[in-house]
Image (cartoon, rainbow, N blue to C red):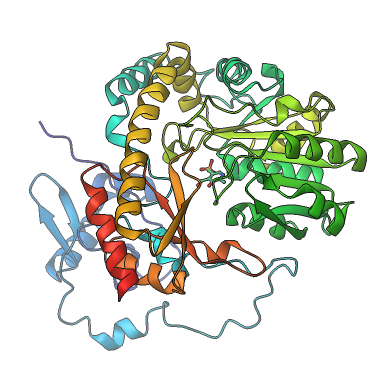
Amino acid sequence: MKRVASAILPIIAIDRKASKALHRQIYDAYRAAIVDGRLRPRQRIPSTRVLASEIGVSRFPVLNAYAQLLAEGYFESRVGAGTVVSSSLPDQLTSSQLADAPHSPTPLGPRPVARRYPKLPRAEAMPWLQSWGAFRVGQVAFDQFPQHVWSTLVARRCRQMNAESAHYGKLMGSEALRKAIANYLKIARSVRCEAEQIMIVNGSQQALEITTRVLLNPGSRVWVEEPCYGLARDVFALNGCHLVPVPVDTEGLQVAAAVRKCRTAQAAFVTPSHQFPLGVTMSASRRLQLVDWAQHAGSWIIEDDYDSEYRYESLPIASLQGLDANFRVIYIGTFSKVLFPAMRLGYLVIPSDLVDRFHMTRRVMDLGPPTFFQEVLADFIEEGHFARHIRRMRVLYSQLRSVLVSRLTEELAAMVEVVGDEAGMHLSVMLKNGHCDMEVAERAARQKLSLWPLSPLYLGEARQGFILGFGGTTMTEIPGAVRKLRNLLTT
Ligand SMILES: Cc1ncc(COP(=O)(O)O)c(C=O)c1O
């Protein structure tokens, strides 16, 4: 027999001393909930037996109230689904009654919010981030993800769940996952770390938030790359830090210029393996200058190594953290690119002497990351699926990148210059012909083409161009998408 899903119990306040009869109180409570929209059409209603027992009355008043609501058309009976809210409101429910419902706007008076809250960009004003189309930045080739393996591992972990694993997990994250990550980072990224220094977080974004709270104060000055990953800048701004934009050239962040501008900054935020968004790799000499500055100024380097696994013309470049003998680098990594963004798992590598501080701060923030998928991911890494997946994806993304670069060169060489295609899942094109990138991106979003404009990523004088993601764009989609881009730039 098919089981009918249990309905959620509404709040029905029964007053036994009231002169109003019990069945009338139940009737009125349901009618009001339907009229003001708290109960929606086709929503399931608890059985008379369940409701009577929950609100502590006999079944008779409940039966009476339900009969009345059915007779007036507020409820209807559905075979196999029990009683539900009617899919159409009864006639006598006029629009004037609806207008009187509590949802009508009333003046609310002053709504004070925190003064340190800066003006943050509205997501709706960025249609290129909403549209689901070719060139969407950050989208992975999910059809290549070994879903069968993943679901086997999920099912196995599910069967192993017990009272202990269902309780609060470890604040720093699952031990198995931290060990697996430390092992991977030492070998693949030349990061100097032990599992004790790894903190599992809900993506790089949370890593930045925790790092800022631990290391910086309102008013702290932070070097940020110009142009820069906007969400990183927003974290610093939200925490009251002053941003010091530092230009990026073909060798990465211009350290000498940054020192001239603000030698005593408390931190530098950098993406040295694949600068976001221009895609350059920081040269060895700039890395050494940066590490040297941090040591002499007593400052911190926040290294965001978000997509370094995918490098095409050479072997992956070692991390900046691995170069620093003074433990001044906070290293951030994520599974958003190597697996998929909805995983919401990333990690921090914390200098050993700061682990306690990070631990205490994290405790106040969220009591640690969700446990279940960490365990699944630890199995995925330990059993070799992670390394295999990266190897396969490197080949695929390299092919997608080659096709995209050759189409752009063949069809758009006069209009754009391609930059930053040596690594990752995106490249950038700089516009040569005076177009406004935001205006073109808005038109593109309406045609299901996702062009992320470069100009909003600059704090000062901006260059015009787009970031084009190729991870989730298929080989067959690329030619059409490049043609669309050409049409947008010629109209
Ligand atoms: C520079 C940079 N860092 C980090 C991320 C990933 O962030 P998260 O781990 O929060 O998904 C992205 C995503 O586009 C990025 O561009």
- Please tell me in which quadrant of the rendered image residue 91 appears: bottom left
From the viewer's perspective, tell me whether residue 39 is left or right of residue 256.
left
Give percent across and percent down for residue 406: 32, 46
Residue in the image at 46% along x and 27% along y: 373
- Please tell me in which quadrant of the rendered image residue 64 appears: bottom left
Q: Is residue 46 visible?
A: no
Give percent across and percent down for residue 106: 50, 84
Residue in the image at 25% along x and 86% along y: 95
Give percent across and percent down for residue 94: 23, 85
Q: Is residue 43 visible?
A: yes
Q: Tell which residue pokes out farthest to the bottom in this image.
A: 96
Count of labels in the image: 0
Quarter of the picture for ligand 1? top right
| Quadrant of the rendering where the C terminus is positioned | bottom left
From the viewer's perspective, tell me whether residue 27 is left or right of residue 90.
right
Residue in the image at 67% along x and 23% along y: 191
Residue in the image at 61% along x and 25% along y: 173
- Please tell me in which quadrant of the rendered image residue 391 appears: top left
| Quadrant of the rendering where the N terminus is positioned | top left
As drawn, 370 above or below 484: above
Q: Nearer the viewer, residue 66 or 317?
A: 317
Q: Nearer the viewer, residue 171 or 433?
A: 433
Q: Nearer the viewer, residue 315 or 147?
A: 315
Q: Tell which residue pokes out farthest to the top in this image.
A: 383
Give percent across and percent down for residue 221: 82, 56
Q: Nearer the viewer, residue 432 or 136?
A: 432
As drawn, 361 above or below 245: above
Q: Tell which residue pokes out farthest to the left in this image.
A: 79
